[in-house]
Amino acid sequence: MEPTVRVVFFEDYKNPERIRHAVNIMLNMGRGIDILLAKDDPERLFVVKPNWIQDAHEYKDHVWEPVITHPELILCVLQCLAERIQGRATICVCDAPHTYADFAAIVKRGEFQQRFEALTEKFPSIKFEVLDLRREVWTRKEEVVVERCRNPDDPRGYVKVDLGSDSLFYGHVGEGRFYGADYDSTVVNSHHRGKIQEYLIAGTPISCDLFINLPKMKTHKKTGITCCLKNLVGINGDKNWLPHYTEGGPVRGGDEFPEYSFLNRFESNVKKIGRKMALKIPGLGTWLYRKMRHLGKQCLGDSGVVIRNGNWSGNDTCWRMVLDLNRALLYANTDGTWRDRFQPKAYLAIVDGVIGGQGDGPLCPDPVQSNVLVSGTNPAEVDAVVAKLMGFAPNKLPVIKNAFEPHRWPIATGKMEDIKVFDGRAGHEVGLSEVRSAVEGGLTPHFGWKNLQDEE
């Protein structure tokens, strides 16, 4: 049996010819990809989905390489695709960044926009697109939303995808107490109740013939790591349909805090009051909420050192949302119906781990020279290998472990322990248990995710 995941080692991004060579080998991994590329159909749509969460580290404008997929990798993938496509087609680079992210600043990183335009001139038979999939963009002041502006829609629209009883939220004890991405939690809870379990997915990724996922290898405060599986948060039109955590503590079936102490209950209730004021009294309400947040940080500690908002290993909400989204991408049609479970969407992942992100990810990671590109055709298998490369045990990460569970719409189709990896360090195939960390001692996890280290 051929290896299902490939790990290739690179010292830096300075040799695009070598990267393109590796990408061309990776493009051969997916069954049927060559047929799609050779098919004489001008309606073909190929999506390239990087991690474009925001243009830089949350507090360090000059630090961006551990935060987003490197422009060199994206451009190499685009060129390799264009060279292999026969006839006319569309290649779309798209993402839905953080709602307050500056999309124009993102696409300027590494001279991406300028070089992308040169690429479009080189291949005139191919239509190239760069799309911001968000429907709304925010302006924040002191971490409080003070303005919301309408963003141009995905030209292919949006699809309401309802997983119903196949959702991992069906029957969840936290129903009615989910928190999404905006101050009005009634929105997320209206989309996740009983047999209604729906997501608003951008039409471009849903309608594409081939989805190429280009995530960044880094830590994440709500899911432990962000890689192929978590990167699909960026195919949404409205992130407030996404449950991020469940309000309350574990005793009440919540995961907002590790323990629901008096101070935690007080903080949670004050936040609710502040959010309501910000929504109902524009101007004065947002000013008051900013002052409340500032006082709260002084009294209770900053989120960079204090666990809150589901930013810990006990988050039992976010991984469910992530796996629901992966099923929506792989199996949903543009009209909200479902594909055959044996014919998921054509998919390829190439993970950017040349410079990885550790510590307070995904917005404030420290850079680490991890020197890897990882590829495969199954997001769960690739993420399991990436976890090992980060020095983490895949089974300690619910977002990976549960992706291997049986389901009507399967993500992984085999067992985790059966994954076969071509390891560029060894020069031959190895089993998952033999994959060693890319960095001596492994990457540092987010402080809310202790004991992730691989014990093998």
Image: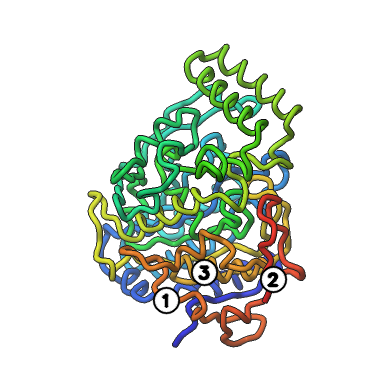
Under mark 3, the amino acid is Val
Q: CA distance from mark 1 to mark 2?
A: 25 Å
Counting residues from the start of the chain, the first of labels 1 and 2 encountered is 1
**Looking at the rendering, which quadrant does residue 424 occupy?**
bottom right
Residue 14 percent location from the top left of the image: 68, 64
Marker disc for residue 97: none
Residue to which mark 3 is pinned:
382
Looking at the image, residue 299 sits to the left or right of residue 52; the answer is right
Under mark 1, the amino acid is Gly
**Looking at the rendering, which quadrant does residue 238 occupy?**
top left
Q: Is residue 245 above or below residue 215?
A: above
Q: CA distance from mark 3 to mark 2?
A: 15 Å
Residue 245 percent location from the top left of the image: 51, 43
Quarter in which the N terminus is drawn: bottom left
Quarter in which the C terminus is drawn: bottom right
Q: Outermost residue, front direction? A: 251
Q: Secondary structure at mark 3?
A: helix
Counting residues from the start of the chain, the first of labels 3 and 1 encountered is 3
Residue to which mark 2 is pinned:
438
The local crowd at label 1, few if under 14, some if 14 to 19, many if 20 or more residues have their Cα within 10 Å, is few
The local crowd at label 3, few if under 14, some if 14 to 19, many if 20 or more residues have their Cα within 10 Å, is many
Q: Secondary structure at mark 2?
A: loop
In this rendering, which labeled residue sits more in front, label 3 or label 1? 1
Q: CA distance from mark 3 to mark 1?
A: 13 Å
Q: Is residue 366 visible?
A: yes
Contact check, label 1 and label 2, Cβ < 8 Å: no
The local crowd at label 2, few if under 14, some if 14 to 19, many if 20 or more residues have their Cα within 10 Å, is many
Residue 258 percent location from the top left of the image: 63, 45
Residue to which mark 1 is pinned:
414
Under mark 2, the amino acid is Ala
Give the residue displayed 47% in from the left and 55% down from the top: 49
Give the residue displayed 73% in from the left and 69% down from the top: 439
